[in-house]
Amino acid sequence: MTTYFNEMYEGEAIRSPYARLGDWVQAMPAELRQMKQAEAEALFRRIGITFAVYGEGGDPDRLIPFDMFPRVFSGAEWARLERGIKQRARALNAFLVDVYGRGEIVRAGRIPANLVYRNEAYEKAVSGFVPPKGVYSHIVGIDLVRTGPDEFFVLEDNCRTPSGVSYMLENREIMMRMFPELFRENRIEPVDQYPELLRRTLASVAPAKCDREPTVVILTPGHFNSAYYEHSFLADLMGVELVEGQDLFVEGEFVWMRTTEGPKRVDVIYRRIDDAFLDPLCFRPESMLGVPGLMDVYRSGGVSICSAPGAGVADDKAVYTYVPEMVRFYLGEEPILNNVPTWKCGQAEDLKYVLAHLPELVVKEVHGSGGYGMLVGPKASSEEVERFRARILDDPGNYIAQPTLALSTTPTFVAEGVAPRHVDLRPYCLVGERIELVPGGLTRVALKEGSLVVNSSQGGGVKDTWVLAE
Amino acid sequence: MLSRTADNLFWIARYMERAETMARLLEVGSRIAMLPSAHGYRNEWDSLLRASGTADGFAKKYGDSVQRNIESYLFFDRDNPSSVASCITAARENGRIVRTALTTQVWDALNSAFQELRALEREPRSALELSRLTEWTMRNSALVRGAIDATLLRNGGWDFLNIGYYLERADNTARLMDVKYYVLLPRADFVGSGLDNYQWTTLLRSMSAHRAFHWAYGGEVTAAKIADFLILNPQCPRSLMTCICGVQSHLDRLAAEYGRETAAQAQARALRAALEGLTVEEVFDEGLHEFLSRTIRSAADLTSTIHESYLSGGLR
C-alpha cells in the first residue's frame, strides 16, 4: 500500500506552514462551511469565470469546482522551487534559441536531431530567427508534483500559452473576500502584481522597429474558446485590447488593429491561439482565426509574438526528458528540479519495460494534453490496460510512460467534512528582459477520492495557493 | 477602441431596448385582452405582432393568434430573434465578448438578467404571470441602463451604447406608430368617439407615455397632440425628436473626442434640422404613414453610415 505525503499532517502533528489552519478548520461549523461554499460559487458565477470543456457539450457556463481549503508553502520551500523554476525557464529558452539557430546541443550529441528537427512543433518558418531579447517562451507554466517534504518533480513544461492564471488570481480574490481573518493571521505573499508583471514582460520584448511606448494586445480565438474568460480578464487587468484575428491586418511593414479612430499600430501580440492558426499565408491556409501576412511582419521585426512561433518544440513530452540535459548544457548547472523518470516507448528497451509493467505505470500520448488519452495503470481495469497495450503497439513513438507517483495530498473540503486529496501545482514564470515569478500558482486538486487526475476536464478542482512570508 | 468592441456595445444597447419594447407590447396586449370589448382582442394581438415585426414568424410556427402562444413567442421563444429571451441572451453574449469595455456593475446587471432568465425558463409556465415577466424585463432593462449611466467611463464606448439605445428606440417608436397610424388619422366621423380614445391610449401605454402625455398636454386627447408628442416633442423620452437629438449629440461627442468628423455627423444634423423645422400639420399633410416610412428609412441610412464610419473597421 502506497503512503502519500500529506502536506498538512505528519501523523497527528501539523506541519508548520499549516499551523494556523488547524484551528481555523476546527472552528468552522458545517453550516458555515456550506454557506461560504455557496457564497464562493455565487461569486464565481457572477464574475463569470466558467470553464467549457472541449467536445463535452453541456453547460458552457460550468464552473470549475473551487475548494476553499488553501494549499500552503513555507517561504523556504518556495525559495527552492523558485530557483528551480527560473532555472528551467532559462534553459528552455536557451534551447529554443539554439535549435532555431546553430543547434549546438544537437551537434554535441546531447539530444537526437530527429526529436528536434522532425518534431511536429518545430517551425521551419522561423529557423534562423532570434526573437527580441532572445526569448521564445514568455510565459512558462511548469507543472509540478510533490511526493515528500523536499521531493518535487516536474511533470511537464508548458512553453506555448499555459492557461489557468486567472484562477490563481480569482481564487485569491475570493479567499480574501470570504476569509479576511486568515489573511490577517497568516503572512501571505500577494499574487495580484501578476498582470502588471505580465504587461511589463510583454512590453520588454517589443520589436526593434518600435520606437515608442509599445502597444500590447491579446489575440484570442474568440468568445467560444474555453479560456475566453481568462483572455478578457487578463486584457482588462493589463489595460490592453483583446483582439480577434479579424481586428488585425497587415499593411506596409506593420500590424494594425481596426479601431473607431482608424488603424492603430500593434507592437506586441500575446497570442492565445496555436501556431497553426496564426497566419493563413504561412501555416494553415483555411484558418479564419489568424492574420494574413503576420509572419512576414514578425520575421522582419515589425511585431513581436508571444510566445514566439515554434516555442512548442521545447514542451513536447518526448523533448521533456532532455530538459535536465539542457540545464547542464546551457547553464552549466545541476538541475534543481527533477524530471519524473520517463520511458520512451519509441525506444525498444524502454518499450519492453513499459509493456511488462503497464499496470504500475502512467502512460501518456506525447502530444496529448488535458488528461485525455492517458492510462493510469494502477487505477485501470485489466481490459483498459489491454486496450491501451494495443494502442501503444500500434504507434509506440507516440507514447511515454512514467512510474505512478505517490502524489502528495492536502486537506480538502468534501461532503463528509475534510479529507486528503491529491494535488499538483502550476506556477507561471514570466520571461522577458527579466525573469519573474509571483509567489503562488494554480493548485489543482483531484476531487474524487483516490484519483490522481487533477485536470479540470476530468473532475478536478482548484485551490488558492499560499506562500508564507519568511 | 476596437471597431468590433464598439459594434458589440452598440448591439448590447439595441438588444436591451428591444427586449423592453417586447415586454411593453406584451403588457399592452394583455391589458387589451382583459377588456370586455367588442373590438375583439385577436385583432389587437395581430397588430402587436405586426408592430414587433414578428407576425410572419409567429404565423409560421403557431398559426392562430392564441394569447398564450403569443406570450411564449414574444417572451421565451429562441426561434424568435426579437423575443425577450433572445434579446437578453444576445445582449449578455455581446457583453461577454466585450467584458473589458464594461464595468463590473454593467456586466453584473447583464449577467444577472441572463442568469435569472435561465431560472425563469426552468419554472413551469403556469406559475408565471405575464405581469411578472413584463415587470421583470423592465426592471432588468432599467438596471442595465442605470449601471451604464452610473458607472461607465464617458468615452467612446458610452457614446456607442447610447447611439444604439436611441436608434433602436427611434425605430421602435416609428414602427409602433406606423402600425396604429390609421387611428391617428383625423377622420371626422371618429373624432372624440370612444373607439379612438381607447386606441390612442393603448398607443401611449405601449410606450409608457400615457401619464407623461397628460402632464405634457392636458385636456382632450387628440390625434394631433399624440402625433406631436411622439414625433416632435423633445420632452417625451421616446419621441423621434428626442431619439434623433440623442444620436446627434453622441455623434458630436465622438467627433470632438476623435478630433474628426465623419459623414455620420452631417447626416444626423440634417435629420435633426428637418424634424425641428416640422409641424404636426405638415406631417399629416405628407401622410403619417409616408412620413413614418421615410423616417424609418432615414434612421436605417444613418445606422449604416455609422457602421461604415466607426463600427466596421474600414475607416482609414
Image (tube, grey):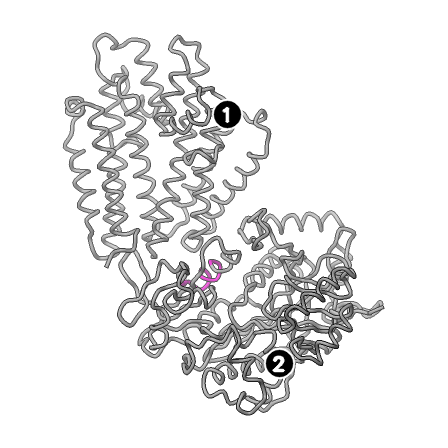
Q: Is residue A242 visible?
A: no
* Viewport quadrant of the C terminus of chain B: bottom left
Q: Toward the viewer: A31 or B302?
A: B302
Task: Please give the chain letter of the residue carrying mark 2.
Answer: A
Q: Which residue was labeled with disc 2?
A: A84
**x then y, percent, for residue B111:** 50, 45
Query: Residue B50 falls in which quadrant of the image?
Result: top left
Is B152 drawn above or below residue A443 in the view shown?
above
Specify start and end residues of the magenta stretch as a single range.
Answer: A232-240
Q: Is residue A125 magenta?
A: no
- The residue that disc 1 covers is B130
Chain on which label 1 sits = B
Left or right: residue B234 compared with residue A244: left
Residue at (50, 25) in percent of width and height? B130
Foreground of the two, A429 or B212: A429
Quadrant hosting residue B284: top left
Which element type, helix, strand or loop, lies under badge 1? helix
Which circle marks residue B23 in the picture? none
Q: Position of residue B67 (x, y in %)?
A: 47, 20
Q: Which residue is at 41% across, 60% downward?
A: A286
Residue B249, percent from left and from top: 24, 44
Judged left or right of residue B203, residue A23 is right
Image location (x, y in percent) of residue A175? 62, 58
Vertical comparison of B99 with B59: above or below? below
Q: Main secondary structure of the magenta part?
A: helix
Q: Is residue B118 left or right of residue B50?
A: right
